[in-house]
Image (spheres, helix red, strand yellow):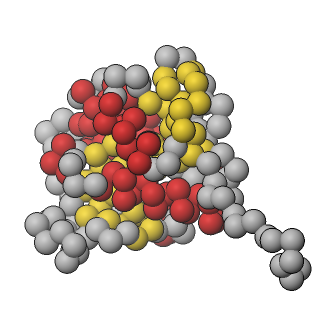
């Protein structure tokens, strides 16, 4: 693990039974694979990038920019959702792919989540990537994997993305994912992801 100069003791894993239990819990969370990404359970060492992203300009869409302490509280809420609601934040880690040979493998590209924070009226699909990994279609690839998982496994009837009106990039991504604008909530645009339409049966179909 790389220790950043501004890391605090509570951000550092300590070997022992507690760490072993944490790894056992993490191993039970769903792991999703796409052509270029591994969406895996969050690890303590992933927080350094999360804090960096939420303390900068990209944090505006997550209620920021946040201090490191506030980013930690947000991170703990997202991670804790797994125990309370059965969904939460995934770390998006790059994997080797012939589709994108220039993409370095084993790097943390960012995070995707199915959240449900105070003020949310329903589960939210969210994403945030480090600037080095933007412009490759990775956010769409990860978000689509979560949409497929939600529809195929969790069977949610509805899922939304809350998007800052000034975030044109995320709005365009929501459109590419097939979401529809569905009003405003506390200054954020609501983009609704509907389940795939099931083929209709003809009147002469066998039942």
Q: Position of residue 133 (x, y in %)?
A: 20, 51
Residue at point 31%, 36% (across, down): 169
Residue at point 40%, 22% (across, down): 165
* Vertical relation: 105 (above or below) 118: below
Camera-side residue of 196 and 68: 196
Residue at point 33%, 51% (across, down): 139
* Vertical relation: 179 (above or below) 59: below
Whether residue 174 is visible to the viewer of this picture, yes or no, is: yes
Q: Position of residue 67 (x, y in %)?
A: 30, 24
Image quadrant holding the N terminus, namely: bottom left
Q: Quadrant of residue 2?
A: bottom left
Camera-side residue of 23 and 29: 29
Image quadrant holding the C terminus, namely: bottom right
Q: Is residue 153 left or right of residue 41?
A: right
* Vertical relation: 71 (above or below) 37: above
Q: Position of residue 154 (x, y in %)?
A: 65, 60
Pick out the residue farthest to the bottom.
206
Pick out the residue farthest to the left.
102
Q: Is residue 116 left or right of residue 65?
A: right
Q: Is residue 7 left or right of residue 185?
A: left
Q: Position of residue 140 (x, y in %)?
A: 37, 53
Residue at point 28%, 68% (across, down): 36
Whether residue 10 is visible to the viewer of this picture, yes or no, is: no
Numbered circles on residues, count: 0
Camera-side residue of 205 and 192: 205
Camera-side residue of 200 and 59: 200
């Amino acid at each position: 693990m790389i220790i950043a100069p501004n890391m605090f003791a509570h951000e550092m894993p300590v070997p022992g039974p507690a760490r072993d239990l944490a790894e056992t819990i993490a191993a039970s969370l769903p792991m999703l694979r796409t052509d270029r990404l591994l969406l895996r359970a969050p690890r303590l060492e992933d927080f350094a990038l999360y804090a960096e992203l939420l303390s900068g300009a990209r944090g505006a869409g997550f209620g920021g920019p946040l201090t490191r302490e506030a980013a930690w509280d947000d991170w703990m809420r997202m991670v804790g959702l797994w125990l309370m609601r059965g969904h939460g934040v995934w770390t998006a880690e790059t994997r080797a792919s012939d589709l994108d040979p220039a993409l370095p493998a084993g790097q943390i590209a960012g995070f995707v989540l199915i959240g449900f924070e105070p003020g949310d009226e329903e589960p939210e699909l969210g994403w945030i990537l480090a600037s080095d990994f933007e412009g490759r279609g990775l956010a769409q690839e990860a978000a689509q994997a979560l949409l497929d998982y939600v529809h195929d496994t969790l069977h949610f009837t509805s899922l939304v993305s809350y998007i800052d009106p000034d975030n044109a990039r995320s709005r365009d991504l929501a459109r590419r994912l097939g979401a529809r604008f569905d009003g405003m909530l506390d200054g954020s645009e609501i983009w609704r992801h509907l389940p795939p339409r099931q083929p209709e049966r003809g009147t002469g179909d066998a039942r």
